Image (spheres, rainbow, N blue to C red):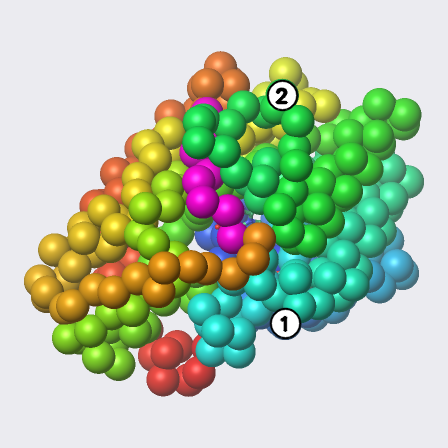
Amino acid sequence: MSELNEKRILVTGGAGFIGSHLTEELLRQGHSVIVLDNLSSGILNNLPKHKRLTFVEGDIRDFDLVDKLVKRSDMVFHLAEYIPTTMSYGSGHVVKYSIDAPLQDFDVSARGTLIVLNSAKKYGRKFIFTSTAAVYGGANFPLKEDFQPIPASPYGASKLCAEEYVRLYYRIYGLPTSIARLFNVYGPKQSKYVMYDVLLKLKQNQFYLEMLGTGDEIRDFVYVDDVVKALILIAQDEFATGEVYNVGSGKPIRINEMIHIMLELLGIRPEVKFAGSSWKGDVKNLIADISKISMIGYRPECSLSKGLVKLINWFKSTNRVQEGL
Ligand SMILES: NC(=O)c1ccc[n+]([C@@H]2O[C@H](COP(=O)([O-])OP(=O)(O)OC[C@H]3O[C@@H](n4cnc5c(N)ncnc54)[C@H](O)[C@@H]3O)[C@@H](O)[C@H]2O)c1
């Protein structure tokens, strides 16, 4: 995996799914990491106990706290975002949450990002922002970074708004910033979204599975280790400054095929029914074109079936489900 020169790294949202995997890799590479997380959906158990890791429970909208932590860091990975967990929010989709609570979504996603970004500018710290494929609004063909984004949900819109500030801070103030538009990330420690939903429902009833949508929707599922690799590549490559990159596997798959693979791996054959429709704002297809990030050396390594085995093994071993997390 690519290595960074920086020594003290602030990871906002570091107690969450992707943030905790990123934190572990940064620690493995010898860095000191400060995690800022308000534990609204992340959990402390996601993080290792490590002498080079400092955990700070707090909010990215707390100006003084953010300012103090950014000052102490050499660079920032900004991942914090409020994404409800499955138990507390249907099947936990951030799109649904943002439609029900657009102001709250905006407040963390856009205003919160601006607060962290502004401190990064004050101290001249490199700033890597995790945006989302939801900014595009979906299409039947692979999405490229230079397509005009037309978000279909408040979540996509608030992330796009945050992106615009990140780009502006690069153009106006010369702050070294980069944006990663993540597609459907999955892996151990993820307790929301479609794969987790499948596992959770099958745990309750292994003979019958009912899912939202039609099953024909196409997504690009990318294993979390590949995403961590991409984020670090983007952070360490000088050509990535001022740029936006799609991060996916480059291997789109229909939801019903993905579920079929999961069932094969689980060795069960439940009756599978699709509700026929999904939430407003949940787009039909999100297909990643990853040619741009390939130019800086990104090569996704984990196949869907290998990644699913790791996810399933984690799911079976965790007591998180029993704990209601
Ligand atoms: N998981 C995916 O498939 C996916 C896809 C596209 C984009 N992303 C982006 O990646 C980032 C990480 O997502 P994730 O899947 O790890 O989600 P997650 O919910 O597991 O992690 C988000 C973390 O942010 C923390 N947080 C929320 N609000 C906060 C606040 N106000 N102050 C401080 N901390 C706060 C949460 O407690 C949580 O630990 C997010 O920015 C998300 O938009 C994720």
Q: Is residue 212 above or below residue 205?
A: above
Viewer-closest of 247 and 279: 279
Q: Residue at x 46, y 39 (%)?
A: 286
Q: Magenta segment: does it hold 81?
A: no
Mark 1 CB lies closer than 8 A to ligand 1? yes
- Above/below status of 216 relative to 262: above
Chief SS of the magenta region: loop
Query: Which residue is located at x 45 percent, y 45 percent?
Result: 284
Q: Amino acid at mark 2?
A: Asp
Location of residue 134 in the rendering, given as x and y in whole percent from the top left corner: 58, 44
Ligand 1 lies in which image quarter?
bottom right
Please name the amino acid that badge 1 sits on: Ser
Q: Which residue corresponds to mark 2?
A: 146
Q: Which mark is residue 79?
A: none
The answer to whether 75 appears left or right of 68 in the picture is left
Q: In terms of secondary structure, where does tag 2 sit? A: loop
Point out the image quarter for the N terminus: top left
Mark seen at residue 40: 1
Q: Quadrant of residue 63?
A: bottom right
